[in-house]
């Protein structure tokens, strides 16, 4: 459970643990219900570099003692996440329920996909990107999008849309993705179709 009573050397988590987590959870629900529509996250103290406010808040909200987490954010960020979220950290991305990536993400096909009977046992990938901007870039369609939505994502690997098409084809199995830039996040549920341009 997030707390503001932190040991020496660790920055605080949510300013108000209950209200902060509730607000972030609501933003995550709205993001999943409206794919590609950025949501602002508030109420989090400055997390340790290289974590962004949105990715850190999302993981504090989602992770707990029963959800293995993988991250490439380094030892200080790992200690911060372990303390505030109480989550076990794993060395193998394939074993993680949640992944928080600050660099190049593992390939989607290598992550937990769930099964036909239990698709909810798949991984959720939180990826820090350089920027999110509506009205440009990808052409998104699918559940939660009335006609179409456009989202420009800066700083994601060039072949992400190819990986995403394969991920989507495995439905109901597959990985869900949350893109994080600063205090903003946007979700890509596995049902979302992405077309370039």
Image (spheres, rainbow, N blue to C red):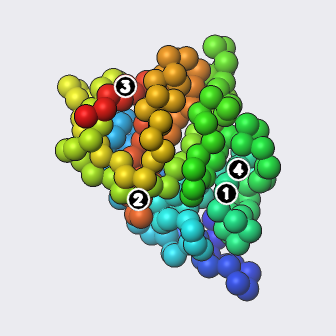
Q: Residue at x 63, y 13 (%)?
A: 116
- The alpha-carbon separation of the residues under discs 3 and 4 comes to 26 Å
Q: Residue at x 31, y 32 (%)?
A: 196
Residue 38, given in percent of the width and then of the height, sits at 33, 50
Give the labeled residue for mark 3: 193
Give the labeled residue for mark 2: 130
Give the labeled residue for mark 4: 70
- The alpha-carbon separation of the residues under discs 1 and 4 comes to 7 Å
Give the labeled residue for mark 1: 72
Q: Secondary structure at mark 1?
A: loop
Q: Quadrant of residue 117?
A: top right
Q: Secondary structure at mark 3?
A: strand
In the displayed structure, 30 sits above or below 184; it is above
Circles 1 and 4: CB atoms closer than 8 Å: yes
Pair 2/3: label in front = 2
The numbered mark, 2 or 3, whose residue comes first in the sequence reads: 2
Residue 11, given in percent of the width and then of the height, sits at 62, 79
Q: Residue at x 66, y 24 (%)?
A: 114
Q: Residues within 10 Å of mark 4 (few under 14, many from 20)?
A: many
Q: Residue at x 59, y 21 (%)?
A: 173
The numbered mark, 1 or 3, whose residue comes first in the sequence reads: 1
The numbered mark, 1 or 2, whose residue comes first in the sequence reads: 1
């Amino acid at each position: 459970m997030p707390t503001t009573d932190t040991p020496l050397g660790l920055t605080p988590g949510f300013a108000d643990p209950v209200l902060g987590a509730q607000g972030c959870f609501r933003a995550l629900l709205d993001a999943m219900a409206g794919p590609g529509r950025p949501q602002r996250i508030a109420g989090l103290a400055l997390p340790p570099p290289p974590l962004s406010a949105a990715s850190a808040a999302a993981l504090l909200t989602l992770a707990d003692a029963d959800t293995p987490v993988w991250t490439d954010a380094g030892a200080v960020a790992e200690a911060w996440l372990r303390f505030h979220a109480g989550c076990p950290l794993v060395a193998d991305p394939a074993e993680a329920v949640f992944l928080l990536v600050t660099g190049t993400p593992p390939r989607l096909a290598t992550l937990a996909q769930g099964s036909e009977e239990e698709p909810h046992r798949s991984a959720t990938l939180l990826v820090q990107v350089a920027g999110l901007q509506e009205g440009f870039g990808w052409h998104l369609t699918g559940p939660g999008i009335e006609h179409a939505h456009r989202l420009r994502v800066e700083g994601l690997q060039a072949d992400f849309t190819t990986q995403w098409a394969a991920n989507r084809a495995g439905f109901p199995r597959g990985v869900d993705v949350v893109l994080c830039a600063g205090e903003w996040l946007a979700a890509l549920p596995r049902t979302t179709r992405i077309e370039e341009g």
